[in-house]
Every structure is written in C-alpha cells, then in structure tokens.
Image (tube, rainbow, N blue to C red):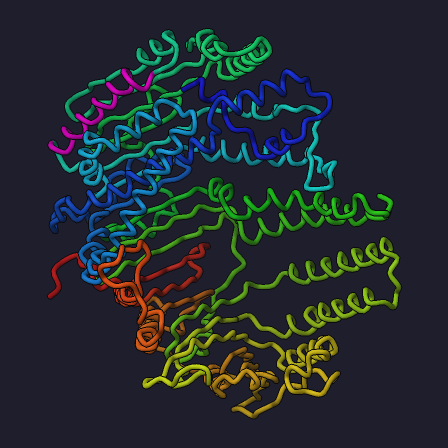
Amino acid sequence: MWQAASKMPEPRAYQHQRQSWPASTPEPERRWARARRNRTAPPCRILRMFFKLVHSCFVTLLAAATAVAQPTAGEIQAGLPPSLQFAPDSASFFYALTNNRLKWDAVADNAAIERLMAMPVVQRAVAEARTQIAADIEQDLQENEVPSWLLSAYEFWVGKEGQSYLPTLANLASRELFIFADQDFAEQLAAYNAEVVTQLSKLRLDPSPDGEGVATENDAPAPVWSERFIRDLNVPRIVAGAKLSGAQDQARVREMLSMFATKFRNELLDLSEAENRYISDSLQLQDLGENDQRWVLHLRGDEYPWDAAIQRHQAASDPDEAAEIQRQYTVFRDLVAGKSLVVSVGFTDGYLFASIGHDPDDVAPTKADQPLYRRGVFKPLLENRSKTFSAIAYQNSLLKQQTSWVTRLSVYIRLLPGLAKLAFVGTELEPTSYQPLMDDVEQDAEMLLADLNRLYNPAGDQLAFSFFFNGGIAGYNYHRHTNPMSVSAQPLVSLQHVGEHPALFNAVADWEDDGTLDKWLNRIEQRAEQVMDLYVESSGASASGPAQAMTTGLAELFRATKDDLLPSLGNESAFVLDFQHRSHQWHPAMPAAEQALPMPAVALVYDLANAEQHRRAWQRFYETINPLLAPFGPLMGLPPGQGLPPASETSIPDGVFLRLPGVAVLGIDPSFAPGLAITDQWAIYTLFPSQGVDLAEPHAPQLPPPLGDVGRPLIAASHVDVLQFADALQAWLDYAVPLIKQSDRYQNQPPEDAEASKAPNIDETIDLLGNVIEVMRQIPSYTQATYVQDNSVVTQSVIQVPSLRLSPAK
C-alpha cells in the first residue's frame, strides 16, 4: 500500500512538462521514465478498469435489490438518522442516505416502469450493456499489466461466490448509509488547491518548436512540490457506514468480512516476502464484544520494509533504472517518516463501518461529545426531526469554498495571461507593444477571481436535507453566510407574467448592483480597443479598410448594449415555455393532423426600468447590423442592397408588438411570428405574438407548493409541469405513428423469421417512446422557491411522486 503511493500520478501541470524535456535532462532519467510507463498500466487505465468493475457490480446489485423483501411500515425509519450522532463538531462534511428501500420501491413497484423494464428492447439493452462492460474489462485485463488485487477482485465478483454476496450488499444499502470526514480533509484540499495555484504561477507557456500546440518549461524536469505536499500530509479521518437490520444480517456480513480478510492475506499480497509478512502482521482483528468487532490495518512509515520494496522493483532494471528507483524510494521513505495509515472495517452500534485515517485509536465511529448537529446551521433540520428523511448533506465553509465551481474555474483563469501572450508571440510586434495589454489582462484575472469569490463563493456552511411525504419528496438547501448579507427578497412580480398554465418557467430577481457589471463592461471595452489597435499595428491594415469597418461595427454594438440595453432592464427576468399554441398543419410540407398539434412556445420576460431606452438599443442594433445583411435581401424577396425592412409594429394593450421581418417566407403557420412585445413595464421576447400579449398581462397562476402564494418574498422560483411535456409528446407521437406505418421503410421491414437485429425495430421504438411518456407521468411536477432567511439563502423544493406512499392510501 505504501509502495503504491510512490507512483502517485503527477499534477496535470507537470504532465505537460514531461511532454517536452529540457535539453539539460540526463538521458538515463528519460530512459527511466519511458521504461516505467511501458512496464505498467497507466494509473488512469487502472482506475477506469476499477470503475468498470464497480459499475458491473452495481448493475448486478440493482437486480439483487429486487429480491430483498419489501420494507414494512415498521422498517421505515422516521426521525433523524442515528449516524448523525457520530459526526463531531469539527467534521468538514457529513452525508447520509436513509430509507433507500422506500426510494427503490417507488420506482421498481411502479406499473409504468415495470412495463418499460419488461420490454424486450430494454431487456436486450441492459443485457448488452452488462456484456459490453464485462468484455471491456476482460480486454483491459488481457492487454495491460494490472495489479493482482484488481484481477482477483474481478474474478471474485463475477464468480459464483461473489454473486452470492450481492443480496447481502443490497440489503445493507436498503436502509441507511453515511459518510463523514474530519476538518483535516478540508484543510488538505485547501493546501492542495493553494499549491496548484503556486505552481501555475511558475509555469511558463511558450509556443512549441513545431508551431503546433504549447510547450512548457521549468528549471527542473521532475516535480518537487508534490514532495512538500506529501511531507505536510496527514491522512484525514474518513468514516463510512451502513445500518444493519439485526443479528442475522450482522452474522452474514461478518462471514463476508472474514472471507475478505483471508483472501487479502492469501491472494492479494504478492509483494516481497518481507512486505507480505509486515502487511499481514499489521492486519489485526480486534474483538471488543459480539457487536463491536473490527479489522484494523495499521501501516507505519518508519517500520515498512523499504529495502525489500526497493529490491523487488530493481529486479528487472538496468543500473540506471535501479539507481533512479533507489533515489525515489529514499525520497519517499523520508517523506512518510513518522506517519501512519490506518484502515479499519468492523461493527459498532448496529452499523457496519469502514474508516481510513492516521490514528489507530480513532477508527470506529462513536457518539461525539460535541456533535455536529448542535451547530446553528442545523436548526432547520432539528425543527423537522420527526420527518421521514431521504437524505442529509452538510459541508463546512472551507470545504464548500474549496469544492465550488469558482475554485475549479480559478485554475483556468490564472492561465489567461499566459494564453493571451501566446497570441502575440511570433508576430512582428515587439514585446514592448503588447506588454501593457498583458499587464492589464493579468490584473483583470486577479480582479475577476476576487469578484467571483465575493459574489458566488461566500464563506458559510451549507446544509441540505430532504424528506418523504405521501405523494412526493420535499427538500431544503441552506447556504448560511458568515458575513452579513446585502440581499433582500421581495415578491416576484414576474410570477404574474409567466402565464396561467406554464409548462416550465424560471424567474429570478437580480441582487442589488454594486457597480460590478459596469466595471467589467468598461474593462472589456478597453481590452477590445487595445487588441484591435495591436491588430492594426501588426497587420498594417488601413484605418479605413474592412478591419476598421468591422471594429467600428462591433464597437457600436457593444456600446448599444452597455449604454442602452442593459441599463433599460429592471431587477426581474423569467424564462417561460408553454404548449398553448396549436395548429393542424404547422408547415405546408407536413400532412395535416386530425388533432391540433402543440408547439413549444419559448419566451424571455424582462422587467423594464426604461422602455424607451430598451427600444433605442434595438434601433441601434438594427442600424448597425442591417448593412451587413443587405447582400442577402434577394433571398427574402427584397431588392438587391436593401437589407431587412424595419420591424413592423402592431398595437397591443399598453404597448406594441415589434414583429421580426422576413419570417413569412419560411411558410410556417402565420401564428408563428417571432418578435418583441413591449410595454412600459415589460419586454417579452417570444415566438408567438399572442403569447407576448398574454405574458404582458398580469395573471394569478395556480402553482403547487412552495409557490402557492405568489406574494411571498422570493429571489428565485421555478416550476416544471412534466404532465404538459408528456401530453405534448404523446400528441406528436399519435400524429407520427400513422405516417411512419405508411412509409416505405415500415412496409419493407424484414420478416419476423429473419435474423434478429440488435437495434430496435420501428414497432419496438414506438412502444418504447409510449412507455417513456408514461414513465414521465409518474413525476407530475417539480417546483422550487429560493428566499432569504436568518442570513441564509434557502432553496425549498417539492417533487410530486404519487406512487411514493409512507402509509396505505385511504
């Protein structure tokens, strides 16, 4: 286990460096790296094979789960999961899944899903997927030199003995699963992210010698930061577990663990004799009582037989390779001196647990003296303690920030200055010409990161939980801010402008503008001007030539957006989709339908601060773009050089509808006429004038909880009416099926006694689509509302699942 750590994959930045060896790199080191790559399977491929194995077992596990007895009312766990008491106040995260069998039954026992899964085409697809996964694993095992433990694990789980334990694992997963980690986990992740940033700051990007791609250079060919990172590393304590159903369940699991321990000693250890003996002796069974047993593997960096490991790796090496092996192991031995790795599996308090850490006295989960749930962020969870929970998730502030999309994106943002420089390296420009731009881009990158972290990655803990009710699942997600929030929620007026029967909408209110948008618009304009000036300088383009005309046009579009369009918008906006528009024949090329067919009508709704300014922005767009469209006028029946005529205006209540010209030549149903409905308060971009008129008028839509009260203060709201999507798809399927059956392809299908094809035939595809539509109806809607409460941003959601029952329907 320790010897595997010496082959840790290098950070991505250094993987790029090894693609281009500096001239000073000794040839022996190059030979050693090539030999090491050729002798063993790449770590990424081993991981891929491992996950394929896990996926194969998971597919079989789902099948095994159907054989587990369904839970009775007494087996449904109400109240907080007992595992919550194991997580200490210092935990960086805690996750728990409860009543998992109840979720599975809501799916597996649904008649529509049963019909779908019983279809021959679906059964063939599942069987082919399992066969393909097994074939891929077999191929990888044959083509690559893989670790013996992976080969042994595969042979075990695909064999009869391994298959016999899958119902046991399915039973374990059917009740409660949990995992948590201590604060070290978040701190180690933060240290890793900080080190990546440090190394990126040292990375120098230069064009590759052949002019294709990027070559990277550093003073040393081998990474050094990973050594420092490992030296400061302590394996964080991570504990996972599953709730046992009773003594019989525990006895079966104990039998399985004993078998695994025997296999580990007798089959998986294929190292040197000294290493095998040390690891085997380090695996101890601690029997503290009938319900408190554990297997503990404690490896110490100071005691591991490193000399034996070195000799094992040097056995088939030439002198240069042997010397490099000696050097690497010497470095790694120094790095892990005084450190420990402790892995444990066992039973405690009615749970099967597995843990990893560095303290042999702190392996099993125990009731924490200061439990995590006493933190203030857990107050909403405790207030709902009597619910039948589905899941609970917690992240502390440090971990939430280190795993956010902002932190992941920051790695690429820090590369922007170097990538920007590449655009000018190799041109006729002197470095002094573009260096001011490079300095500004570097400053922009730092400012962008600061703004993203301030706006989208604030400090504060996060708690999410969901629970069942008869007919659905309700959820809450709390982002508790450490610093005082400047966000205040108001009733969303845009909810009155999504129509009476929307199939889907998402409405949001912008947070108070602190000048960030204006700042970035100005900086973008400045950079664009700098780039165009450099382009003209490098190409020698005329100040009145095509390049200048393009520059002038783009600058005008940007200024129209910056000066008129964006300032004209208010604080609210919404995306709306409905199926209220129908036609028997949407296009002359389509056969007419007996029943009118629904067309998805999409609209963007904006609250306006200044309607006149909004119209002025689009007039500026038209005047700038239209000359570019003049050559295409004849395609739309217009005289050459004329371009598009202005949008036609039609009066609507309290405003006008501006119709996009030229759409009639497409031959689509006349009700389809994209344009802009604008009043003093609202701008609606729509495909259908009637939809624009409707959305401009206030309505009182009947929405399910948590949006039953449109006057509730919110900062965002969304809703999906799945039934409307299912009805629309069904209408189009009913229209298409007779046409398909009249087609030559359908009439000329192979006879039934012909050799079966793996691909579904037309009839199977039609049946499959019909069953998929029926499955969609099993989750009628999803609704969510976001609001502010106690310095937290809270998202409340409700999923309707009629087949989900906690008690028999009355």
Q: How many labels were placed on the picture?
A: 0
**Residue 469 seen by the camera:** no
Q: Residue at x 10, y 66 (%)?
A: 810
**Could you say where residue 647 lies in the image, as x and y percent from the top left?**
63, 86
**Could you say where residue 202 lies in the image, as x and y percent from the top left?**
69, 33
**Could you say where residue 533 lies in the image, as x and y percent from the top left?**
83, 57
* Residue 264 located within the stretch drawn in magenta: yes
Q: Nearer the viewer, residue 391 or 44?
A: 44
Q: Nearer the viewer, residue 753 or 269?
A: 753
Q: In the rendered view, would you say 623 is above or below 147?
A: below
Q: In the rendered view, would you say 138 is above or below 511?
A: above
Q: In the rendered view, would you say 438 is above or below 520?
A: above
Please name the predominant secondary structure of the magenta segment in the image.
Answer: helix
Question: Considering the image in quadrants, where does the N terminus appear?
Answer: top left
Give the residues drawn in magenta, as a range: 248-269
**Could you say where residue 80 lies in the image, as x and y percent from the top left?**
25, 46
**Residue 635 seen by the camera:** yes
Q: Residue at x 20, y 57 (%)?
A: 118
Q: Residue at x 30, y 40 (%)?
A: 56
* Residue 761 located within the stretch drawn in magenta: no
* Residue 755 found in image quarter: bottom left
The answer to whether residue 659 is left or right of residue 462 is right
Q: Nearer the viewer, residue 20 or 416?
A: 20
* Residue 783 found in image quarter: bottom left
